[in-house]
Image: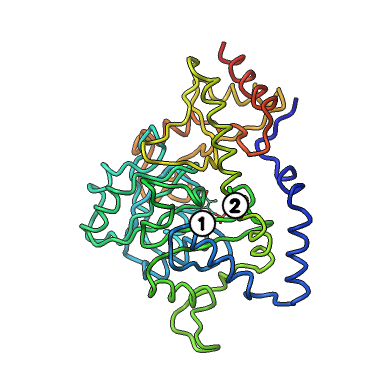
Amino acid sequence: MQVPLLDLKAQYAAIRDEVLAKINEVLDSQRCIGGPMVEELERAVAGISGCKYAVGVSSGTDALLASLMSLNIGAGDEVITTPFTFFATAGSIARVGAKPVFVDIDPKTFNISPALIEAAITPRTKAIMPVHLFGQMADMDPIMRLAWQASLAVIEDAAQAISATYKGKKAGEMGTCGCFSFFPSKNLGGIGDGGMVVTNDEKLHHRLFILRNHGMEPKYYHHCIGGNFRLDPIQAAALLVKLPHLDSWSAARRKNAAYYTKKFRGSAVQTPFISDGCVSIYNQYVIRVPRRDDLVKHLQSKGIGCEIYYPVPMHLQKCFVSLGKGAGSFPESEKAAQEVLALPIYPELTDEMKDCVVNAVLEFLS
Ligand SMILES: *Cc1c(COP(=O)(O)O)cnc(C)c1O
């Protein structure tokens, strides 16, 4: 039996007619930039994130970039973040001319270790960018305390964690702002690229709002140098159809996760650790296993999809060699990169498919 890592066709089949009808509304209106659907999606995503404001943008990467720009972070500034993340986190910091300052992860959650942040703060530090990896929020209370003490902004990279909670607070709600991605593989995925920034700060919202459109207000009067970071209304249309399903899809992922975790009990598989007070949306179900690379080959031979998120931590990427952090600088991130493996967790998996995944993993380990 073939089990792909993700099957977007299964999800689309259930909502196809609705998505097509909504896209047709955009096409018939010929409001091809911005418009009511983008605004409706912004209100809805702000609402589910416990935030007053939201600004739709062109991608999760641009959400991070626009956030940094709107906070005036640039050359000479430092931003503290995790090396165990998708490239866009560190990439966006470098693109505004600031320096990514890495802090190692908590090996249990894979998220930035708050205990290590304080030592990384310098007079140049302007912000902390925690990543809510795989769908579980980082340990935000100590992060917010440190940020408050040192007057730092907190930009939540919540690309993988829309609607996840930490002690009852939503992803994006606790920081200065929160950044979401609608990349198709995220829990709320568009039919192409898209993203959003949420915030409770009215001034920041306004800066983001004009920054995504060349810093322009009114037309042809430019306050600051922004860019074209606008969210496409066709993406907004598809996302408006999908948004009401987000909670049930995330619940189905949690159910699949519980199923796997139960079946792996007593084996050499280290299953995901969810901290007290956290509700994960399981954008990924990531295990640690011995001889990980051999397991990948075994699963591939059985037609089971899997993926390594992420094989090379940011400090060891070629493009960040100039930061001068060689091998051994962040041992937990480096160890995680050797041991992690994401298994299929998407909502439409059947029990038969999950058993197939579990049996293939256990067969390899025995
Ligand atoms: C997906 C992702 C991004 C970037 O989002 P895009 O929409 O692909 O630009 C940023 N950070 C993390 C942690 C992500 O997983």
Quarter of the image with the C terminus in it: top right
Q: Is residue 275 left or right of residue 41?
A: left
Whether the residues at callouts 2 and 1 have beta carbons within 8 Å, the answer is yes
Sooner in the amino-acid sequence: mark 2 or mark 1: 1
Q: In which quarter of the image is the N terminus?
A: top right
Q: Residue at x 53, y 29 (%)?
A: 258
Residue 109 — which label?
none
Q: Which amino acid does label 1 sit on?
A: Phe
Residue at 73% over, 52% down: 15
Q: Nearer the viewer, mark 2 or mark 1?
A: 2
Q: Which residue is drawn at 52% across and 73% down?
A: 212
Mark 2 residue type:
Leu
Q: Residues within 10 Å of mark 2 (few under 14, many from 20)?
A: many
Residue 84 sits above or below residue 53 on the image: above
The residue where tag 1 is placed is: 180
Mark 2 sits on what residue?
A: 188
Is 140 rendered above or below residue 108? Answer: below
